[in-house]
Structure formats: structure tokens, C-alpha cells
Amino acid sequence: MTATTVRPTRPVTPPGTVPVIELTDVTKLYRTGDVEVAALAGVTLRIEQNEFVAITGPSGSGKSTLMHILGCLDVPTGGQFRLAGHDVGTLDENHLADVRNLLIGFVFQQFNLLAYLPAWRNVELPLIYAGTPPAERRQRAMAALDKVSLANRANHRPGELSGGQQQRVAVARALVTEPALILADEPTGNLDSTSTDDVLGLLEELHTDGRTIVLITHEPDVAERAERVIQVRDGRIWAPGDSMPAEPT
């Protein structure tokens, strides 16, 4: 049986045995006319279970391309990407969709909540796609809202919630499938300083509870809240001690 015929499931190996993210010499090339651009130029990266990692870098560094690959929203041109033990390169589009829904919980800058649905129905959406029975969906959605201290606002629509509360609903939606990875893309970009601190505190709590979190941000003070910061420059990972390329003048 080939890997493409197996529906991805959450890892069953003990914590620490299989890294959540393992990239080996990953490249991503884009072509515009006759010009070929390397958005990623040989990225090797390993993120273990229960790590809280921030990925940061200037505009055009390859940070967004890396995020799209980690979220299985794009595929590498070369190299290997394993997510919770699954070789992503062997999966077809249907199985990639399963990976995104089951193994990754997304938190976006724009919240991406449906305005006409109450909070708990927004949270249950990934479970609908997974085919979870209705009674179980509601129970798990309410449990996820309770984890982010919003169970008492379960029947409020997004327009009736503050920006920080909407982002908490988005975090609850990311948690509801019990994914291997929480991938947060600029989750504080639309929030004021108080709500930013609130949401980052929530991510820290989830990390303390054993969640693996990858935070994409261009803000140094936000990145500092993670336990490890990864710098991306010119499509490469730059470790502490490496000489950074000069900023363009």
C-alpha cells in the first residue's frame, strides 16, 4: 500500500519521538517569464513536539513561502517535508486537504470567522469537514471555547465580539480537531496592545499545556514571546552567530 492511499491521522507515537516538522533541504522556485526566483534556497528545519517557535524575517525574505509550505498550502519544488511523520510530498490533493484539517490548526490575522454564525458554530467547522457527528461537534466546540475562556459567549456572532475575543474564537477553532500543530500567521496584526498581550498569553498557556505552536510574525516583540526564534533571510534560515546579509539600500 502506498502512502497516498492512507488517510493521515494524528501521530500515535510517544511525545518527542517524531518531530512535528522536519524539512530537509527544501527549495521553492517561482518562474516569471524567463526569470526563475528561489523563494526558499535549501531550508533545513526541525521543530519538536511541544515547542513554541516564532518564524520572523523582513518582507521578501521567504517567510510567507515557508509558512505556506508548513501549512500544506503549497508544496516544495525540491527537498523533503515531513509533518508529524507524514511525508507530505507523497500525498495527493485530497490527502493534503485531510492533513490540513486534521493535523494543523490555523490562526490567521483576519480571524476568518463567518459573520452569520455564532461562535460555537464557527468553532465546529473543521469537525464538519472531518465528518464528526453533530452532537459530538457541539460538545467539542464548547470544550474548545471553554479552553479559551469564551464558553459564555458561545452564541454571540463575530460582530458582537471584540477583536481579541474574535481571535480567541479563531484559536478555539484551531484547537477543536486536537491537531499536531497550531500555525499562527500574524495572529496579532489586527489587534491593539491589550488584545495582543491577551492572545499571546493564550498561546503561551497552550504551549504550557503541551501544544506545538509555530508563530509567523514580522514584529520582534511578538517573536520574543516564543521559546525559539527562527530568522529567515534570502530564502534561508539564519542561526545565531551567522552573518546576516546587508539590508538593501
Image (cartoon, rainbow, N blue to C red):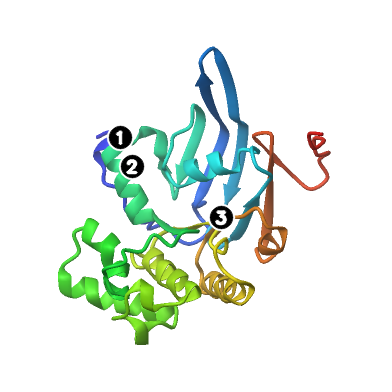
**How packed is label 2: few (under 14 Cα within 10 Å), some, or many (20 or more)?**
many
Alpha carbon of mark 2 to alpha carbon of mark 1: how far? 6 Å
Of the residues under marks 2 and 3, which one precedes in the sequence? Answer: 3
Q: Amino acid at mark 1?
A: Asp
Name the element at disc 2.
Answer: helix
Choose between 113 and 215: the one closer to the eye. Answer: 113
Quadrant containing the N terminus is top left
State which tag comes first along the sequence, 3 or 1. 3
Q: Secondary structure at mark 1?
A: loop
Gap between marks 2 and 3 measured at Cα = 21 Å
Residue located at (49% from left, 62% from top): 15
User: How far is mark 3 from mark 1, CA to CA?
Assistant: 25 Å
Tag of residue 48: 3
Between 210 and 203, the one nearer to me in the picture:
203
Label 2 with label 1: CB-CB less than 8 Å: yes
Give the residue pinned by disc 1: 92
Q: Amino acid at mark 3?
A: Glu
User: Which residue is found at the position 36% from the left and 33% from the top?
Assistant: 90
Q: Secondary structure at mark 3?
A: loop
Q: Please state which amino acid type lies under the numbered disc 2.
A: Leu
According to the picture, the residue beneath numbered tag 2 turns out to be 96
- The residue sitting at the bottom extreme is 152
Q: Say which quarter of the image contains residue 225.
A: bottom right
